[in-house]
Image (spheres, grey):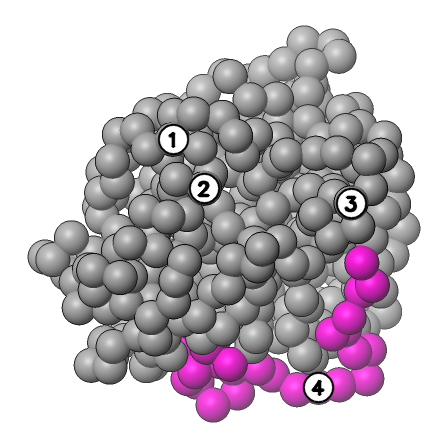
Amino acid sequence: MKYLLVLLVIATIGACDDSSPGKSHSSDADTDSDGDGDSDSDADAGSDSDTDSDSDSDGDVCAVAAGCGSHKWACWPMPNPPSSGGDVPNPASLSDNGDGTVTDNLTCLTWEKSNPESVGDWWANYDRCAQLAADSFAGYDDWRLPTRIEMASITDVTLGYTGYYDVFDVTSGYYVTGSFWYKTILTEADADPNNDEDRVWGYGTNGFTSNAIVRSDSGLVARCVRGNGSGEAADEYAAEPANHYTIGTDAVTDNYTGLVWQRGYSDTLMTWSAAPSYCAGLTLDGLSGWRVPTITELATTVNEAKVGGAIVDEAFPGNPVGCKEPQYWFWAAEASEVGGEGWGLSYCDGFTGWNSGGDGAWNYFPTANVRCVRNADS
């Protein structure tokens, strides 16, 4: 069964116009993957080493997000915690609409402000969002489950054990998404017994991302969302948007988020505290002003259509392939408020975590790689 996601196009950033109804439609987890370190993938698409196109050239971020054709990639500027500092762009901007919904003025998405404390398995949460649509909650009938990257946009791991912006009411339980794990999609599409998985991307209450939430588990919750045009169903691979990257020699620009990335990464593993100096000392393709990315910025580079190197290889060649070891982790800028020193992301699948684990644990990375980022206008 396809969980078809049909959404409403909303208007420009800072003043998202909700004057038109949406189109109706029916309808303690281990954060490690299978650990095989293989490079299973759907084909990379959408990168162009020759194009200079800018998906936000007309300044209409909401129109771009609605037209990019993907919910599993960030087709909008990724919000960052306001506490990140002046050199980090896009401080989060969320408006409580007073009707049980919250509008994100950067991503153009509209969210539930609150969610039930306990719902059930993944399908029960899917049905609850569909029921919001059927009931035209807050005047709209296009409510759905958010994807992995959409859910990332409302997390703030600097807040500690409740890692979501304060405008939201947060419950216990894992928050599920409309993004099935890569090998779960393989199972459903190909009926391959070697990929007999039942996993969906989800988020813990402290904001960490896991690919290992079991869909049939009870006690799962969800925060429903609406907006940004049509996109992939839960059981479809992430579809990379057109003209996604402009690729240089040592730097690559994401034409949707506006971030400029180091194509490679640090030559050696380093501690979290050493990462800022490494980035500050870089000059790549004549560009300076590099910094350590936030955890949500790192999340925008994850290609859900792959495992064992979940990234677009053309844009980021030579990324390490594997799981569970420090050499597969990349540092984020945020210090950890829940143990360990700092946050990081593993391209095994794209899961995130804090480095408090002991040797052999899923989140054991006393040292890690660094891939630096800069603002397009810095």
| Residue 40 sits above or below residue 63 on the image | above
The quadrant in which residue 68 appears is bottom right
Kindly identify the amino acid type of the residue bearing the numbered disc 2: Trp
The disc placed on residue 123 is 2
Reading the image, the residue beneath label 4 is 52
Disc on the earlier residue, 2 or 3? 2
Disc on the earlier residue, 1 or 3? 1
Q: CA distance from mark 1 to mark 3?
A: 25 Å
Whether tag 2 and tag 4 are in contact, CB under 8 A, the answer is no
Q: CA distance from mark 4 to mark 1?
A: 47 Å
The disc placed on residue 191 is 3
Reading the image, the residue beneath label 1 is 120
Whether tag 2 and tag 3 are in contact, CB under 8 A, the answer is no
The quadrant in which residue 355 appears is top right
Magenta residues?
42-67
Rendered residue at 15%/53% (across/down): 100
Q: Quadrant of the C terminus?
A: bottom right
